[in-house]
Amino acid sequence: MNRIDRLTGMILLLQGQRVITAEQIAGHFEISVRTVYRDLSALGEAGVPIIAEAGVGYSLVRGYHMPPVMFTEDEAAALFMSGEVTEQIADDSLKHALRSALLKVRSVLPQEKRDYLHRLKDAVGVWFRRPDDSAKRESLMPIQDAIVRRLCLAILYNTANRGTLTDRIVEPVGLIFYSRQWHLIAWCRVRRDFRDFRLDRVARWEVLGECFEGHAGFSVKDFLRDSIECHELTPATVLVDQEVLERFRLEMPCTPVSSDLQADGRVKLEVLSFSVPWMAEWLLGFGRRVEAVHPPELRERMGAVARELAGMYAEETVGV
């Protein structure tokens, strides 16, 4: 990024924050703090009204706004691709807002850049397996709003997907997409602890008028990391044919540890798994292209399931 683009970006960064430190600016642009000081000084000399408060950070004088900046082709393309990805994982509440925002972006682009995006849309697509939409709800935007406004939620939750529904009042602090599902991180008043609720298991929800206090220092990232570390993980070893290696890594529901190329061309992967029975059935989806080596119970489980399948289809053959 050249300096002119960086200075423009720095104004936009200041414009979008109440206050920001030199270290945060340096991290955003991947430059040194000394360079940040030089850039801020240059902006001040150019007439940009920057307020510096010792021990707090930098901000723009209230009411100052930089005139609208025209998007480059790369920036417009990046927004388009972000929209395409979001279309695959968002519910209707988020999709409608995103489409409206992108429509406004397109409306201010000159004709040649609109033509560029039109050609890009015809040439590029983002496709992957979606989560189950059988219980689809417009929940993301209202829940996201409840998190920001610190409003309690009343939910009817299917615990562990066992069909046991429980009413709970929760204090929402985070919304995360991982393992192909949206997850609500919230303080549960029933369990009196933070919990991870999968939205596809929420049978009913309602934003309440009650505000909650506390949780100011809560970190969603730390919560997820601690949740993973407190689970008892089972080490496993598998041999994977290179033809399916990329798919295996993309879909892998476990934590990778190491990878080694073997003399026969296969790749030996060491992984940590939450559930041996679940992993066994997932590995069977790769047929003979994946072999479980360790632990013995993983091989035994795969063999048992494979024999059950063989018996089921053998019975059908006899019946024909």
Image (spheres, rainbow, N blue to C red):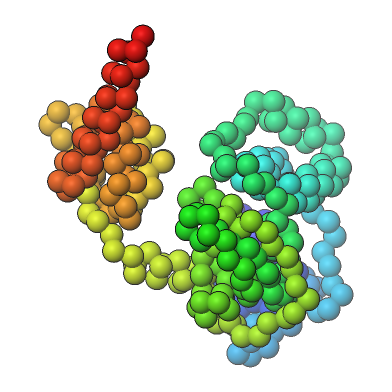
Image mark count: 0
The location of residue 256, given as percent across then percent down, is 30, 51
Is 30 situated above or below 194?
above
Instruction: Note whether residue 31 is visible.
Output: no
Residue at position x 53%, y 55% in the image: 163
Residue 32 x/y as whole percent: 51, 70
Figure quadrant of residue 313: top left
Foreground residue, 115 or 223? 223
At x 30% / y 28%, what residue is drawn?
A: 309
Q: Is residue 238 above or below residue 209?
A: above
Q: Residue furthest front?
A: 319
**Horizontal arrangement in the rendering, residue 295 relative to residue 249 (left or right):** left
Residue 60 position, x and y percent, is 77, 76
Residue at (58, 82) in percent of width and height: 215
- Nearest to the observer: residue 94 or residue 22: 94
User: In this picture, is 116 found above or below 216?
Assistant: above
Tell whether 289 sits left or right of 127: left
Viewer can see residue 211: yes
* As drawn, 66 above or below 70: below
